[in-house]
């Protein structure tokens, strides 16, 4: 009996293998039938496809975008990852949007005008627009969304959800909110009442996070709104169809779209985690476009006539920061010595390649308040050495002293005043869009610094969450690398976010404190006149430069690789790209 | 036998509790906070605190000493682990911290993908490994044996990510025969029953779907199968070689039995015990070790998912997946032990 069982299992295995082979055979004879909607592999070269494939590919009606990670959620108000916005940006519209390829907010679902002191914004909504679920887009819908984000007591403001961007951009929840009221005038007119003037108001409205969802859909799905099961419902050019977790999200064009009708019928946003595999999928014709490619693949793509490279303007800045709890770093001469020790231009051209530019402001080039009169740091190790000598370190610096006790999040003292530790350079353990090869840059900086008399220890703090956690608690005790990417093209989102609260030492920003800078930034965000704001942000840049409070390294443009047949794709400096303009040439 | 199986099943319980404790402890030894991992560069104090509160991360991991000092007994036991264990008893694996959806829900969708890949890889490994191992042992030191040995050495040492990329280069980019990744082509759908696509498509008579799924799974399955194939080949060969030296084999041959009968009826069955053991271990390795294969072929299984979850400190996912793998591993090993008794009448568990 028992013997038989084993052999039966074996027999079954063999039969199964035959079955597989047999099915494989039948399959080759039959044409790849169900792929009628989409040709399985659009032959990018001459049709050298096996005879079993469909002969002539029909007009391509599906745009497939390849990316490294899945969306977290499709409710844009509770997430912060670009991969979520890439999809929600197609399905949901905001009241304003960023004009193609720029950071200028232009009217989308609404057109707004401010009163004299810019504390009341009157908005006229588009009429006759419907959500994908058939319900009307109107003042009530807008008010529902804003109230849901703002009020922690709102029935659809769930405790498990963090409406991070509402809090960050509009000053806080409930009574802390700068928007004190969204008043309905009639079905298609409403007013935003602000507690104080807010210069980036329209830019904020245009952000993907403040896109308007169908209230009915939110109420129906409850906490599941935005999950693979719940999807999302807006007024955008594409409608949500399905989300296979970790694989792909499928969208279909909204034939009733109020704006320019989408040119391609289906959009698939597909996850291909491995950078090389993603690039190969593009070359194989399995996807039409991708983001995030390794340098070697970019070189291959440049040489391939079937591919094209587009660059997204770098609305980001990478930097080297000082921890101001270190006594030596409190001396501006030491900080300046560090600045002159680093060959920033060499590092950027080596490690960012041709997609990077050297930074001399925290603000990216061209942003309101960008201060072009600031000089780049001269690479001069001799000057560094003499500055160090002036500061009292003629033999260079290899150990530093803690100025005051430093506690961790739980209140334990981690560093005590007077403690001497090695001079560390913390490098990021990951690649970020603003920092293509952080470790290599770290090594380069360490080599530069050593040549100028700083004997640094290149330090790995742990993986990314560990690194971010230590940074948040001001525990990266030395020099450290990091960066920032903008959300709405406004300078407040850069300088204001970082140093606007600098009347006290900012733990997260290496304990930096500068009340004068903070006052300027707090004023700048309330001024309605862009020219006056520009002056203040420019002044802030000058202060940061004179203080050498940080060393700005580079701005990185993100390359996107697309099939040469893709037309109408415009990289957006902020926010999701607009897939409705995409079409294929033959 | 029934008693033995029952005993084994009962012994699974303390093992699993041990597994949950170890996973729980090790995860919390890694520095870094799920809330910070989730909120990234934007994290504010308040939001980090809120997320920690929401997911109970502000509670002690195991037991609250402070509460005990204050004489608060329920507070003493109100720890992350106890909360987790309570939910586990109700078959609830908890919710993902980042996604806020039940771990079980995602697991239901992703686990079959990994299982299907692992089963097919194991099938390939058995299909090739055992016959080649036998053939190689029966013709020791022949060219076949030499080739097998070199081949299996390569199989164990070729990095999967390299092999995977080479497969894609050849079959997707140059020959354009096979898709470069994922489980199905756009527009192809298979009615889900078990979520094992090959099986579901056969059950529903969807042969076009089967062919599409097969074209997608073949490259990752081959890549994943290389190591187990090599190991099983080598194990079968060496085990067969041992058995072939035995007296009873010489007797059988001397009796005038054909080589086939000697090999398959007399030698193979006895040589099979160590091979079965290795197969059992390989099943676990396949399930847990699919991370690389899944990443390269964008295969939506649990490997890549759990890897990302470790980086993101999404504790409930890591706990859920590890627990599931532990359960399967224990179960497969139980099957292996039972099969010993079936193969070798001298082994008895009664």
Image (spheres, coloured by chain):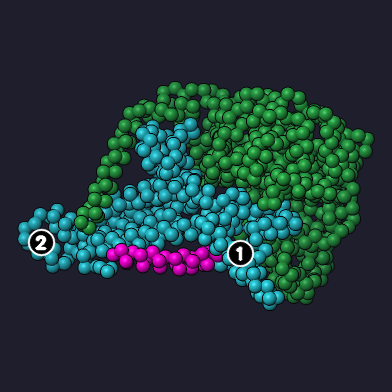
Q: Are marks 2 and 1 in contact (CB under 8 Å)?
A: no
The one of B151 and A498 positioned closer to us in this rendering: A498
A396 in relation to A553, above or below: below
Residue at 93% in and 38% down: A117
Q: Residue A136 in the image: state x and y as whole percent.
A: 71, 28
Residue at 48% in and 68% down: B18
Chain letter for the residue marked with disc 2 in the picture: B
Could you tell whether B318 is left or right of B127 in the image?
right
Gap in Å between the C-alphas at discs 2 and 1? Answer: 64 Å
User: Do tags 2 and 1 sit on the same chain?
Assistant: yes
From the image, tell me which residue sits under label 2: B252
Could you tell whether B197 is left or right of A422 in the image?
left
From the image, tell me which residue sits under label 1: B80
Split into 4 quadrants, where in the image is the N terminus of chain A? bottom left
The one of B318 and B85 positioned closer to us in this rendering: B85
Q: Residue B96 in the image: state x and y as whole percent.
A: 59, 53
Tell me the crowding category of disc 2: few under 14, some 14 to 19, or many 20 or more residues within 10 angstroms, Cα based. some
> What colour has chain A?
green
Question: Would you say residue A349 is visible in this rendering?
Answer: no
The chain drawn in cyan is B
Question: Would you say residue A525 is visible in this rendering?
Answer: yes
Chain letter for the residue marked with disc 1 in the picture: B
């Amino acid at each position: 009996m028992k013997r038989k069982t084993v052999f039966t299992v074996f027999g079954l295995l063999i039969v199964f293998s035959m079955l597989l082979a047999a099915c494989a055979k039948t399959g080759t004879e039959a044409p790849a039938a169900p792929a009628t909607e989409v040709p399985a592999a659009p032959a990018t070269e001459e049709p050298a496809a096996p005879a079993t494939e469909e002969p002539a590919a029909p007009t391509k009606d599906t745009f497939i975008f390849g990316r490294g990670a899945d969306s977290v959620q499709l409710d844009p108000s509770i997430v912060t990852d670009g991969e979520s916005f890439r999809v929600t940006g197609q399905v949901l519209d905001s009241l304003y949007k960023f004009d193609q390829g720029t950071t200028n907010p232009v009217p989308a679902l609404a057109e707004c005008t401010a009163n004299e002191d810019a504390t009341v914004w009157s908005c006229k909504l588009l009429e006759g627009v419907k959500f994908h679920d058939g319900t009307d887009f109107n003042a009530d819908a807008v008010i529902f969304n804003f109230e849901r984000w703002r009020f922690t007591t709102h029935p659809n403001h769930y405790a498990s959800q963090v409406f991070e961007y509402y809090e960050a951009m509009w000053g806080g929840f409930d009574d802390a909110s700068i928007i004190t009221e969204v008043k309905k005038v009639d079905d298609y007119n409403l007013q935003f009442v602000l507690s104080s003037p807010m210069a980036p108001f329209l830019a904020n409205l245009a952000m993907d996070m403040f896109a308007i969802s169908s209230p009915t859909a939110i109420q129906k799905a409850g906490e599941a709104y935005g999950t693979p099961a719940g999807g999302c419902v807006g007024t955008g050019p594409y409608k949500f169809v399905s989300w296979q977790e970790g694989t792909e999200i499928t969208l279909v064009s909204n034939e009733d779209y109020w704006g320019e009708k989408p040119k391609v019928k289906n959009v698939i946003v597909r996850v291909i985690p491995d950078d090389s595999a993603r690039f190969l999928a593009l070359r194989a014709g399995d996807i039409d476009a991708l983001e995030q490619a390794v340098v070697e693949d970019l070189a291959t793509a440049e040489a391939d006539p079937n591919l094209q490279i587009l660059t997204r303007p770098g609305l980001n800045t990478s930097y080297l920061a000082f921890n101001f709890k270190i006594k030596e770093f409190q001396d501006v001469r030491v900080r300046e010595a560090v600045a002159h020790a680093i060959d920033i231009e060499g590092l950027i051209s080596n490690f960012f390649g041709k997609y990077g530019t050297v930074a001399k402001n925290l603000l990216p080039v061209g942003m309101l308040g960008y201060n072009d009169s600031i000089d780049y740091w001269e690479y001069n190790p001799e000057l560094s050495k003499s500055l160090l000598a002036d500061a009292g370190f003629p033999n260079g610096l290899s150990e530093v002293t803690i100025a005051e006790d430093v506690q961790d999040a739980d209140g334990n003292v981690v560093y005590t005043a007077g403690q001497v530790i090695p001079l560390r350079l913390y490098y990021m353990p990951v690649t970020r869009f603003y920092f293509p090869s952080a470790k290599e840059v770290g090594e380069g900086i360490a080599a530069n610094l050593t040549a100028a008399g700083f004997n640094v220890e290149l330090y790995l703090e742990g993986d990314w969450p560990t690194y971010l956690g230590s940074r948040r608690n001001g525990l990266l005790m030395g020099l450290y690398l990091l960066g920032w990417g903008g959300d709405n093209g406004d300078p407040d989102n850069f300088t204001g976010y970082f140093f606007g609260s600098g009347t006290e030492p900012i733990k997260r920003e290496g304990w930096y404190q500068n009340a004068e800078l903070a006052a300027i930034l707090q004023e700048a965000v309330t001024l309605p006149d862009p020219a006056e704001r520009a002056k203040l942000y420019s002044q802030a840049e000058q202060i940061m430069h004179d203080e050498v409070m940080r060393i700005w390294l580079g701005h990185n443009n993100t390359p996107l690789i697309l099939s040469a047949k893709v037309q109408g794709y415009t990289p957006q400096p902020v926010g999701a790209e607009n897939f409705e303009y995409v079409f294929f040439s033959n | 036998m029934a008693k033995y199986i029952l005993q084994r099943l009962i012994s699974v319980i303390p093992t699993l509790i041990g597994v949950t404790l170890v996973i729980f402890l090790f995860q919390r030894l890694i520095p870094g906070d799920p809330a910070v991992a989730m909120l990234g560069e934007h994290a504010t104090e308040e939001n980090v605190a809120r997320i920690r509160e929401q997911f109970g991360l502000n509670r002690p991991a195991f037991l609250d000493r402070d509460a005990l000092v204050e004489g608060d007994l329920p507070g003493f036991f109100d720890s992350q682990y106890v909360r987790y264990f309570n939910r586990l008893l109700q078959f609830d694996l908890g919710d993902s911290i980042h996604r806020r959806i039940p771990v079980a829900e995602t697991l239901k969708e992703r686990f079959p993908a990994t299982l299907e890949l692992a089963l097919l890889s194991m099938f390939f490994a058995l299909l090739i490994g055992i016959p080649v191992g036998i053939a190689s042992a029966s013709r020791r030191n022949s060219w076949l044996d030499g080739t097998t040995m070199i081949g299996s050495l390569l199989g164990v040492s070729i990095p999967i990510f390299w092999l995977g990329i080479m497969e894609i280069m050849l079959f997707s980019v140059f020959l354009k025969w096979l898709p470069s990744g994922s489980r199905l082509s756009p527009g192809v759908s298979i009615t889900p029953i078990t979520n094992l696509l090959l099986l579901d498509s056969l059950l529903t008579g969807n042969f076009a779907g089967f062919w599409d799924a097969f074209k997608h799974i073949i490259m990752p399955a081959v890549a994943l199968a290389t190591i187990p194939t090599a190991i099983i080949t080598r194990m079968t060969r060496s085990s067969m070689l041992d058995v072939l030296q035995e007296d009873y084999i010489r007797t059988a041959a001397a009796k005038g039995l054909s080589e086939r009968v000697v090999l398959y009826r007399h030698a193979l069955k006895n040589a099979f015990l160590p091979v079965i053991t290795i197969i059992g271990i390989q099943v676990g390795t396949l399930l847990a070790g699919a991370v690389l294969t899944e990443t390269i072929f964008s295969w939506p299984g649990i490997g890549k998912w759990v890897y990302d979850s470790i980086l993101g400190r999404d504790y409930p996912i890591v706990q859920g997946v590890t627990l599931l793998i532990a359960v399967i591993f224990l179960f497969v090993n139980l099957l292996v032990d039972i099969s010993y008794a079936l193969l070798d009448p001298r082994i008895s568990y009664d």
